[in-house]
Image (tube, helix red, strand yellow):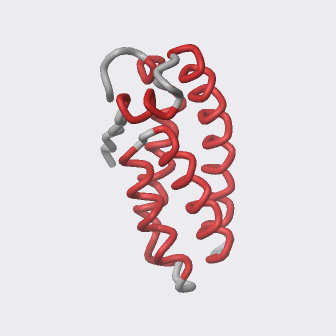
């Protein structure tokens, strides 16, 4: 499954008042936090824990929203809505997609460069 990481760098920079140093610190913290939440999402999905899936997806959505990671935000939102209804069995592809997006974000040194991904 191919995933495309969409990042609104302009939005992220606005969130920190245009300070590149703070943006880079925020991105580093987000990478760590989101990596942990993606693991929690996978564990909850494997355990068919709809509440855990919804909670992890909600946290990922919030983190992504704060830094302009649009593709992560949208995918996490879709998962959260379905899982909140108690359904997880149909989410395998979406969970894989979201985890892949988070992994791409975490591994990307270019995320804080001039160009958005």
Residue at the location (45% across, 34% down)? 104
Name the quadrant containing residue 3. Answer: top left
Depicted 75 relative to depicted 82: above or below: above
Is residue 23 positioned above or below 35 on the image? above
Q: Nearer the viewer, residue 32 or 67?
A: 67
Residue 96 location in percent, x, y? 46, 55
Q: Residue at x 32, y 29 (%)?
A: 117
Name the residue at the front extreme: 17
Number of labelled discs?
0
Q: Residue at x 62, y 77 (%)?
A: 50
In the picture provided, is 86 more to the left or to the right than 92? Answer: right
Quadrant housing residue 24: top right
Residue 44: x %, y % from top left: 67, 66
**Image position, residue 34 (x, y; %):** 61, 43
Residue 46: horizontal and vertical position, in percent?
A: 63, 66
Residue at the location (47% across, 67% down)?
79
């Amino acid at each position: 499954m191919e995933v495309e990481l969409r990042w609104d760098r302009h939005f992220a920079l606005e969130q920190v008042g245009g300070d590149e140093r703070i943006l880079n610190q925020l991105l580093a913290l987000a990478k760590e936090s989101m990596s942990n939440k993606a693991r929690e999402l996978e564990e909850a999905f494997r355990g068919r824990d709809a509440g855990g899936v919804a909670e992890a997806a909600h946290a990922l959505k919030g983190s992504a929203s704060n830094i302009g990671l649009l593709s992560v935000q949208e995918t996490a939102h879709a998962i959260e809505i379905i899982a909140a209804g108690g359904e997880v069995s149909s989410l395998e592809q979406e969970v894989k997609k979201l985890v892949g997006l988070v992994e791409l974000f975490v591994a990307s040194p270019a995320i804080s460069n001039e160009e958005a991904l």
